[in-house]
Amino acid sequence: MNTDILSKAANQARGLAMDAVHKCNSGHLGLPLGSAEIGAVLFGEVLQCNPVAPKWLNRDRFILSAGHGSMFIYSWLHLAGYEVSADDLAKFRVLHSITPGHPEFHETPGVESTTGPLGQGVGNAVGYALSGKMAAATYNTAEHKIIDNHVFALAGDGCLQEGVALESISFAAHNQLDNLILIYDSNDVTLDAMADITQSENTAAKFKAIGWDVVTIDGHNLVEIEKAIKRAKKTDNGKPKLIIAKTVIAKGIPEVAGTAKGHGEGGAKFIDAARSGLGLPADEHFFVSDDVKAYFDDLKAKRSRLHKKWNRLFAAWAAANPEKAKQLDHARKDTIPADLIDTIPAFPTEGKSATRNSGGDVIQAVAAAVPHFITGSADLFGSTKNYIKNGGDNSVKNPTGRNIWFGIREHAMGAISNGIAYDGLWRISNATFLVFADYCRPSIRLAALAKLPVTYIFTHDSVGVGEDGPTHQPVETVSGLRVIPNLDVIRPADAEESAGAFVAALQRKDGPTLFSFSRQDLPIMGFLTAKERREGVLKGAYVAVKETATLDTILLASGSEVQWAVEAAKILGAGTRVVSVPCMERFDRQTTDYKATILPHHVTKRIAIEAGVTALWWKYVGLEGKVIGIDRFGMSAPGNQVFKELGITTEAVVAAAQA
Ligand SMILES: Cc1ncc(C[n+]2csc(CCOP(=O)(O)OP(=O)(O)O)c2C)c(N)n1
């Protein structure tokens, strides 16, 4: 390792961060300055990557979990030769730049995940590591090992204080993800204060007890950093690796270094002196010296050669294993059969079925049709019914298992699923009770923001849960999720709508889809064809019962309440239409014409019913309409009694229409 040039590069990376933060008058200097030597060893020596092919299958993944230190990754991507120019750095935090305030997936080549909400990146890294283990077990052969990369994450005190990180590190140890290397930027500072005001645990002992390998090093010593990383890379002992790097926050700006003032942009006012202290020219900003440039140019060429060598290995593997090669190609392209909607077997045309049970049938057909589709549950497979029957349990002994046991770690389940989705080799779904969606909500929000096609199979979706009572009865949850931009929430009314829900989710490539499945039985709507109901879901809303006289009343409902609207229509007479609304977001994306055919403007007598808060339904019923819902918490009693007690009934719909 060329320590002379790398320590020079570290100081120039410091300069890049200072210049960018100073120019836009905001951002964080603490981490980019404090972790500069870590960046130098990663991007200047040990990372297996190719800046001109940032999606190379066998690259090491690097996730900046401490996303506030975004200038760290932008500087190092720039220095390493990714498509992040000095001009891009100068546009840090500027509208439409590729260097947003916190790293965003899709925005910047080399950024592997959207981070900023602390702790999420640790979960994402665990997801990447699990995805890598599964991929290695699925695709490597004794002769050709095409996947042997590592996953790195850089996290600070803040990330490691968050519960999602703790859940994730337990999962990582239990699943023996020894391809994961977490570097802890341990600088004893958080935002408000020195870290000892809020933490006093022995992190090394904690991680060791959980099952990690731990080493503590001087985070400014290039040789120590390199040694720790190289050892971590070659130790395949079933343990994820924690490197505790003791660093000085904002190193390079003496006025604030080592203090909470160094965390943000506080040091920016001292940068002229700081830059000169680091040997950077006063008159040239975003400066990179010729020798540092030459070093990274050489390294880039070397990395390209390594990638080319791997390409030959990959070609030999593909020639020897055409079936595996085809599967990998489909997985990477996320190929979903165009006829998926027809390959899901039709359900009986009468009887009853809880949509969680129907979902449990549909998932078998989906898993058969889409080999890279996988699922998982937070210790609730028995209730959420999403177990892939011939998929096997994912475990250390069976890393190709398609059913992941997340444990009672909903938040980590969300963040790990995002990591798997970022990696793009598996189509991930996961499951818990709908009411616990709040435990995963920060990760769901990030999946939506990062356009990840994660599928959430959430069940027990209303007061219909019954005896477990208000703690387990979602009332605000469905609508609370509907307000997350780019998340599709589907609440099917019967078995065929559940089939449509899976098709909708699988077809979607640019965002997550969440199912709200019932615990209780719902009548099969055999008066409609399977095709009508499945395609109705894809449209978001459709006419379930068509009026037989002049239309005067529209009843809208979702999920378990569609049955009450259907019953009410029979009583209200020939001018009544029932619209099933399994997915508001899909419906809202339809053409104005389609929407007008479902909800003709001139019909203002509209009543919506849903066993949840009324808020969002007003947009469909208008101010002259009525919404029958539950704007309070539920109660512990058998589900049908709770529905009656809270007025979610056919009679309530009829009364509202006749009032
Ligand atoms: C979930 C979450 N809570 C709060 C914040 C606001 N925040 C950003 S950085 C930070 C302090 C983090 O401390 P540390 O990880 O030690 O970072 P360092 O001070 O070393 O840069 C806080 C509270 C956030 N980004 N995410």
Image (cartoon, rainbow, N blue to C red):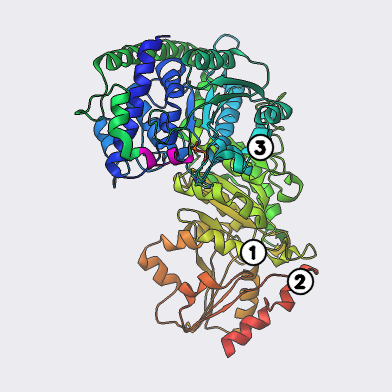
Query: What range is drawn magenta here?
Result: 260-267
In terms of sequence position, does the residue under pointer 2 or pointer 1 come before the other?
Answer: 1
Q: Residues within 10 Å of mark 3 (few under 14, many from 20)?
A: few
Q: Residues within 10 Å of mark 2 (few under 14, many from 20)?
A: some
Viewer-closest of 655 and 643: 643
- Which residue has dot 3 on it? 200
Q: Secondary structure at mark 3?
A: loop
Residue beneath the point at 56% across and 54% down: 500
- Which residue has dot 2 on it? 640
Circle 3: residue type: Ser
Prevailing secondary structure of the magenta residues = helix
Q: Position of residue 546 (x, y in %)?
A: 52, 74
Using the rendered view, name the quadrant where residue 29 is placed: top left
User: Residue 503: in sight, yes or no?
Assistant: no
Residue beneath the point at 35% across and 45% down: 26
Viewer-closest of 75 and 585: 75
Using the rendered view, name the quadrant where residue 3 is placed: top left
Determine the residue located farthest toward the bottom in the rendered image: 659
In terms of sequence position, does the residue under pointer 3 or pointer 1 come before the other?
Answer: 3
In terms of sequence position, does the residue under pointer 3 or pointer 2 come before the other?
Answer: 3
Circle 2: residue type: Asn
Residue 65 within the magenta-colored segment of the rendering = no
Q: Secondary structure at mark 1?
A: loop
Circle 1: residue type: Gly
- Which residue has dot 1 on it? 526
In the rendered view of the protein, which quadrant contains the N terminus? top left
Mark-to-mark CA distance, 2 and 1: 22 Å
Viewer-closest of 228 and 304: 228
Task: For ligand 1, tell me if the residue under mark 2 lies within 8 Å.
Answer: no
Q: Position of residue 47 (x, y in %)?
A: 46, 19
